[in-house]
């Protein structure tokens, strides 16, 4: 079987399984199985696949057909121009979260705290973009802390990143110019509507607070001010329908200049609140 034939068969199989954009996934997984860059798949299309590559590709397609995310199968996901190591222990970085990066980089800061760091994609990206910045990433999951530490090493920022296992602000010391977070903001009654890739394969504690999706924002609005410098700010990702609710939570706690910022599609995606001190 040639690579082109294998890819066509895989695309049909994924389409029948209801996988969105099956041709793209078939191409990415073939590149991974053959250990070539995705841009070079066209070059190997006329060639016969070696038996070991064909077997590996078939296994990958079988897993994708039961909706295991591509990032879990290849072990990586692109985020803000960098490849991050990913596993089932951490939330898969989303393009929407790049809006949080853009909002953060528009601010001045030298110390940053990333709460619920997961893969470390937010913290590592900010440190990589700002060579003079030091930061701390906190996650309750030991496996997530290991993943974040590995990504910090991969991107050359480990000497400026401390990864701590902890429950949000518990155990955090010092003050920061910036606190960032992509917290679990999906309400419990919204979980069933998520795609199988997300609902069945990503860590539940990174998706939902098992309540209304707003509990972490209440915690941050009530406590984060004590961890900020006088000019510090909190920048968090929010669900696209949560802008008004999250802004009201911060305003009720006396935060200044609370703003809701859009993502590239124009949907509310980021909350920015300045220290109420």
Image (cartoon, rainbow, N blue to C red):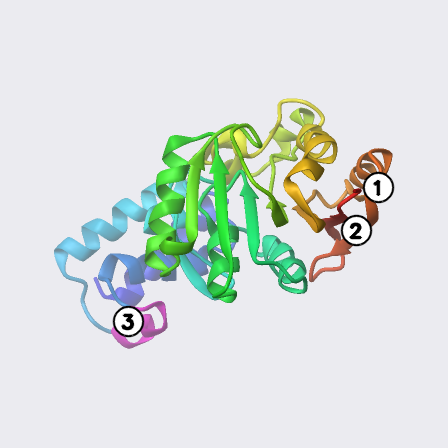
Q: Where residue 43 sits: x, y (%)?
A: 28, 77
Q: Is residue 94 above or below residue 216?
A: below
Q: Where residue 153 sits: x, y (%)?
A: 33, 54
Pick whichever, 104 or 244, lies toward us.
104
1 or 2: tag closer to the N-terminus:
1
Residue farthest to the left? 51
Mark 1 lies on a secondary structure that is: helix
Span shown in magenta: 37-45
CA–CA distance in space, label 1 to label 3: 51 Å
The image quadrant where one finds the C terminus is top right
Left or right: 233 in relation to 122 = right
* Marker disc for residue 244: 1
Query: In the rendered image, which residue does mark 2 sit on?
Result: 260
The majority secondary structure of the magenta stretch comes to helix
Q: Quadrant of residue 54?
A: bottom left
Mark 2 lies on a secondary structure that is: strand
Residue at screen point 33% across, 48% down? 150
* Marker disc for residue 45: 3
3 or 2: tag closer to the N-terminus:
3
Q: Is residue 36 above or below residue 233?
A: below
Is residue 41 rendered magenta in the image?
A: yes
Q: Residues within 10 Å of mark 2 (few under 14, many from 20)?
A: many
């Amino acid at each position: 079987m040639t690579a082109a034939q294998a890819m066509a068969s895989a695309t049909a199989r994924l389409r029948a399984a209801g996988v969105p954009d099956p041709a793209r996934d078939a191409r990415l997984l073939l590149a991974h199985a053959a250990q070539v860059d995705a841009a070079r798949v066209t070059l190997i299309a006329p060639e016969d696949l070696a038996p070991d590559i064909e077997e590996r590709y078939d296994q990958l397609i079988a897993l994708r057909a039961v909706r295991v995310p591509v990032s879990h199968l290849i072990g990586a996901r692109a985020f803000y121009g960098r490849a991050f190591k990913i596993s089932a222990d951490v939330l898969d970085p989303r393009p929407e979260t790049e809006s949080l990066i853009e909002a953060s980089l528009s601010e001045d800061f030298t110390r940053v705290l990333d709460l619920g760091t997961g893969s470390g994609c937010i913290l590592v990206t900010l440190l990589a973009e700002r060579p003079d910045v030091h930061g701390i990433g906190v996650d309750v999951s030991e496996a997530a802390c290991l993943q974040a530490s590995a990504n910090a090493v991969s991107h050359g920022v480990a000497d400026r990143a401390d990864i701590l296992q902890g429950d949000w602000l518990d155990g955090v010391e010092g003050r920061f110019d910036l606190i960032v977070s992509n917290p679990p903001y999906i309400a419990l009654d919204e979980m069933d509507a998520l795609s199988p890739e997300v609902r069945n394969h990503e860590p539940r504690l990174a998706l939902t607070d098992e309540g209304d999706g707003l509990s972490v924002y209440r915690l941050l609005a009530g406590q984060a001010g004590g961890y900020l410098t006088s000019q510090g700010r909190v920048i968090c990702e929010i669900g696209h329908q949560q802008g008004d609710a999250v802004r009201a939570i911060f305003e009720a706690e006396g935060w200044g200049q609370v703003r809701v910022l859009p993502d590239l599609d124009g949907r509310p995606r980021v909350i920015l609140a300045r220290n109420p001190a």
